[in-house]
Amino acid sequence: MRVIEVIDSHTEGEPTRVVVAGLPDLGPGSARERMEVFRRDHDAIRSALIREPRGFDAMVGAALLEPNSPDAVAQVIFFNNVGFLNMCVHGTLGVGRTLQHLGRIGPGRHRLETPVGEVFVILGEDGSLSVDNVESRRHAKDLVLRTERHGEVVGDIAWGGNWFYLVHTHDQRVGSDRLAELAAFSRDVEASLRREGVATPDGLLLDHVEVFGEPTRADADSKNYVLCPGGEYDRSPCGTGTSAKLACLAADGKLEEGEVWRQESVIGSLFEGRIRRTERGVVPRISGGVWITGEARLFLDPADPYRHGILL
Ligand code: PYC
């Protein structure tokens, strides 16, 4: 029987399950190479870790692996209910809190290897956590999209570690009392992006839809609803999505170094975002609250028909 040890946390409401022991050997290699081995040979374990009855669809997993570089504290691969993620900032914040919980890091700036490159987790003396994400940039501004049920919407395409269509003009109010409507709207947008063949510069499908509205909190600049691949919405303001937003704001001259952007999530939680400008875009720093919620040993009993999750 396979036994997998996990530490669970949430980042501004969004869960992360960090796998600390019990995964099969993914061989040597970079985070991207190991992610491909995980995907090819052990996808059933990804599913077991995230899907019911051991997990639930909104959960993001993070496999904590040995790094290649002696300067890195760990290598991390992110996954969810339907597959693997390029990057996940709320998950990286969860990894930071988990490494602190395990006594593996103290205050300072710590390097992590991910499938899209190096990122840094910053643990403050006061226990605060931030992530210096990968360089983020806008690819297209004000792309008009005809949807099936919601008329024309307008948004930008940007990279923040994942690819986003950031919808700023639409017929929706962003609020926690409208989760079903926002899910239906975002799926309509997602289907329209596919139908129209809207793609990343590499010809890949955009993987996240981010819908912006007026903030509810007095301390926030904006509120978002983020549809993740797999159909769930991000309970946090989505760190890669906030990074994509910061890249758009910087490209429009609406955010400068030293300024803070406060992004509220649909449930009312908050990330703070800052930027450092680069030649091609920005390096975002995202800060948010992270709490450990539990530790568990998960059993994948060969006799259990649902050991790999309920696959409906
Ligand atoms: O925080 O980057 C993020 C994220 C991606 C998917 C869910 N959360």
Image (tube, helix red, strand yellow):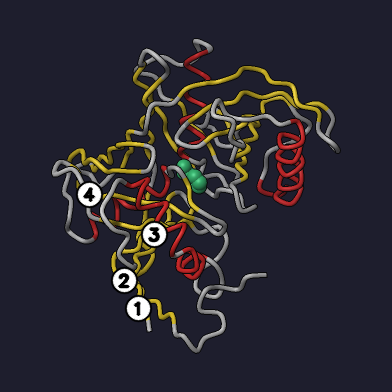
Q: Amino acid at mark 4?
A: Pro
Disc marking residue 9 = 3
Tags 1 and 2 touching, CB below 8 Å: yes
Q: Position of residue 19 (x, y in %)?
A: 34, 63
Using a 10 Å C-alpha cutoff, classify the residue at mark 3 as few (fewer than 14 neighbours), some (14 to 19) or many (20 or more): many
Q: Position of residue 9 (x, y in %)?
A: 39, 59
**Disc 3 or 1, which lies upstream in sequence?**
1
Q: Amino acid at mark 1?
A: Val
> What separation in Å lies between label 4 and label 2 (alpha carbons)?
17 Å
Q: Amino acid at mark 3?
A: Ser
Name the residue that disc number 4 marks. Answer: 67
> What separation in Å lies between label 3 and label 2 (alpha carbons)?
19 Å
Q: Secondary structure at mark 3?
A: strand
Q: Position of residue 41 (x, y in %)?
A: 44, 63
Using a 10 Å C-alpha cutoff, classify the residue at mark 2 as few (fewer than 14 neighbours), some (14 to 19) or many (20 or more): few
**Disc 4 or 1, which lies upstream in sequence?**
1
Disc marking residue 22 = 2
Q: Amino acid at mark 2?
A: Gly
Q: Position of residue 67 (x, y in %)?
A: 22, 49
Q: Which mark is in front, 3 or 4? A: 4
